[in-house]
Image (cartoon, grey):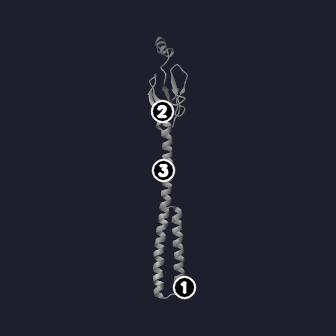
Amino acid sequence: MDIAALNGVVQAINLTKQLAKAAFDGKVDADAKTKIGEVLEKLGDVQDGMFNLREDLHRLQLERDDLKKKLDAADSWQQRAAVYKLTQTAGGAVVYISSDETPHYACPSCFNKREIHPLQDNRTARGKFRCTGCTAEFPIKPQSAAVNVQPVAQHWNG
Ligand SMILES: [Zn+2]
């Protein structure tokens, strides 16, 4: 039963209650008045039940809409995530790599938060890429020879 059907039933009960009230207020004997009074009381109970039912239905519909949104979001994330897999790069970093038409590495930390941030090349000799989402850096490429010389130079300086 949906809200519209429920509202129809609530209206029918209201109408029945009005008719019973009119009969109660009319010229009827005491015995009939007692019976009509009982009918009115029962109708009141039914009315309360219908109001509760309508509230429950409304709450359930909100919950359903909320779940549907979550499900849609999960579906679209599954689709986006499907083109990525974990890989270890030449520099030793473990990151996600895409298999779509513009291959790129993606930040594993952000990926776990369901965000995809392609890693950007710092263009330094250390071979690191950075995430524009969380600013983490990853050793994607091996360090170049120029950097490997540096510790020796430091040794000479004491
Ligand atoms: Zn990140």
Q: Position of residue 59 (x, y in %)?
A: 49, 58
Please say if 112 is above or below 10: above
Q: Are marks 1 and 3 in contact (CB under 8 Å)?
A: no
* Labels 2 and 1: the sequence-earlier one: 1
Name the secondary structure under disc 2. strand
Residue 26's quadrant in the figure? bottom right
Q: Is residue 74 above or below residue 108?
A: below
Q: Earlier in the sequence, mark 3 or mark 2?
A: 3
Report the Cα–Cα distance between label 2 and label 1: 78 Å
Q: What is the number of callouts on the image?
A: 3
Q: Residues within 10 Å of mark 2 (few under 14, many from 20)?
A: many
Q: State whether residue 32 appears in this view.
A: yes
Q: Element at badge 3?
A: helix
Q: x, y (%) of residue 95?
A: 46, 29
Instruction: Estimate the x, y position of residue 49 in percent, counting from the top left.
Output: 46, 68
Q: Is residue 114 visible?
A: no
Seen at 48% across and 46% down, the residue is 71
Q: Specify the amino acid type for callout 1.
A: Gly
**CA gap, disc 1 and disc 3:** 52 Å
* SS under mark 1: loop
Q: Which residue lies under the disc numbered 2?
A: 84
Alpha-carbon span between mark 3 and mark 2: 26 Å
Mark 1, residue position = 26
Say which residue appears at 47% left-offset and 64% top-offset: 53
> Label 2 is placed on what type of residue?
Tyr
Instruction: Please name the residue that numbered disc 3 is placed on.
Output: 67
Three-letter code for the amino acid on which mark 3 is drawn: Leu
